[in-house]
Image: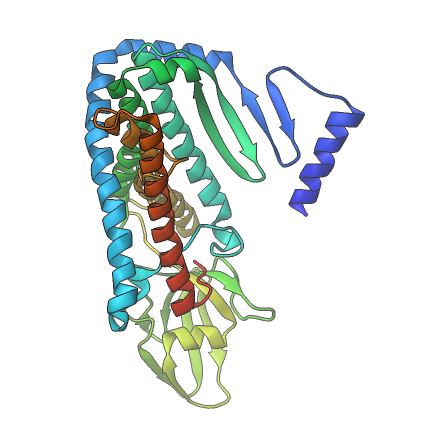
Amino acid sequence: MLAIGWIAAYLVLKFVVRWSPGSVKLYPLGFIIKSERTLWTLDKLSSIAPRLLKIMSDIGIGLGLIMMGAAIYLLSNNLATYLFAPSQVGPQNIVIPLVIGVTIRFEHLPYMLLALGVILVTHEGMHGLIARAEGLKLRSTGLFLFYVFPGGFVEPDEEEFKKAPARVRARVAAGGSFANLIVGLIILLLIFGAFSQLEAGMIVAGVEEGAKLSVNDVIYSVNGVPVNRTTLYWNITASDAIVIEGSRGRLVYGLREPINMPVAHVLRSLGVTHVSFYYPMRVGLGDPMLEHSLYRFLFWIQLLGINVAIFNMLPVYFLDGSLLMTSLLEKFIRSEKALKGVNMALTIFSLGLIALNIGFTFKTFGLVQI
């Protein structure tokens, strides 16, 4: 329905209203906004401490190579586990693409999109800052929205970029992932500092029709047993009633016959289909749902920040890792044809690793949804 709405709006604006402002480009499933003011802002920021930016980008090159190696090692080691030690395969070996509605439940969409906006803007912003600190011309900067996915972009002058020294191009290439990694690690530390790492209960994320609990109910205990990751599969014995202590107070549900089953099965019998663990803030906001929403937003920022940083450094043709690798290999491979051949081989190898990991995940676990 959303896609149909996008296309209808595009057709009306493009052919009926004929709305075509110079700074906005319309597409069937999104739009791009270009801004000259952003260029001015990047110039101002990059001029404050250009030497510091260059030092940071040199560090970014080193970290980029480490992340590239880590990505290849982790994917290779994960694939080896599937192939040679299948008895050791567990949830830690799952590799899935992030596809809303398929591998990612819709309940995560608002937090994921907000986090993605933060990650993409900081990623592209760092590319722009380093480019301007190195004196490279930028053709445009701006924001875009494709379907429901927000982002930002920085477009350097292609010819000027190609003529720049290899070290300059390597700095620009590594800058985005460096920014993502730093943001992800800072947010991760913030999560550990601001939130308790022991679950204080669970929040109902999904229910079936006619369920006795509602979405966003917080469950602290079931028949006196505190609900957390450890106790979720503890058995509960009850003969007369199930007693839920939660955000709506004390809820009592009568039983037709005695039960002896894990907490998870008790909740399922009450119509709960999905839950999220509730990590309270060390200095509480007074509202569990507000704390939980903040936690999920920060969780997605660190998850996307760290994973995008590492994935983006894979030597795949359309990723920054390939640009970084090309800039470094030019010193050893003088032939442009040979360099393209190496890039193609690295791209095929990396994409093959990803595809095989996803394939074995699907074969072993079926369609995984988080």
Please state the horizontal and vertical placement of residue 64, each as a whole percent of the image.
25, 34
Q: Quadrant of residue 366?
A: bottom left
Colour mode? rainbow
Measured as percent of width and height from the top left, residue 281 is found at 30, 47
Residue at the farthest bottom position: 257
Vertical side of 21 occupied by 233: above or below: below
Please state if 107 lies on the left or on the right of 313 as rendered: right
In which image quadrant can residue 277 be found? bottom left
Camera sees residue 282: no
Count of picture labels? 0
Between 338 and 271, which is closer to the camera in this rendering?
338
Residue 105 visible in this rendered orientation of the protein: yes
Q: What residue is rendered at 43% in x and 10% in y? A: 40
At 43% from the left edge and 89% from the top edge, which residue is drawn? 258
Give coordinates of residue 363: x percent, y percent. 41, 67
Q: Position of residue 70 (x, y in %)?
A: 23, 45
Please identify the quadrant where the C terminus is shown: bottom left
- Name, please, the residue furthest toward the right: 16
Q: Is 229 above or below relative to 40?
A: below
> On screen, 260 above or below 269?
below
Q: At 24% from the left edge and 57% from the top edge, which residue is drawn?
A: 77
Q: Nearer the viewer, residue 332 or 102?
A: 332
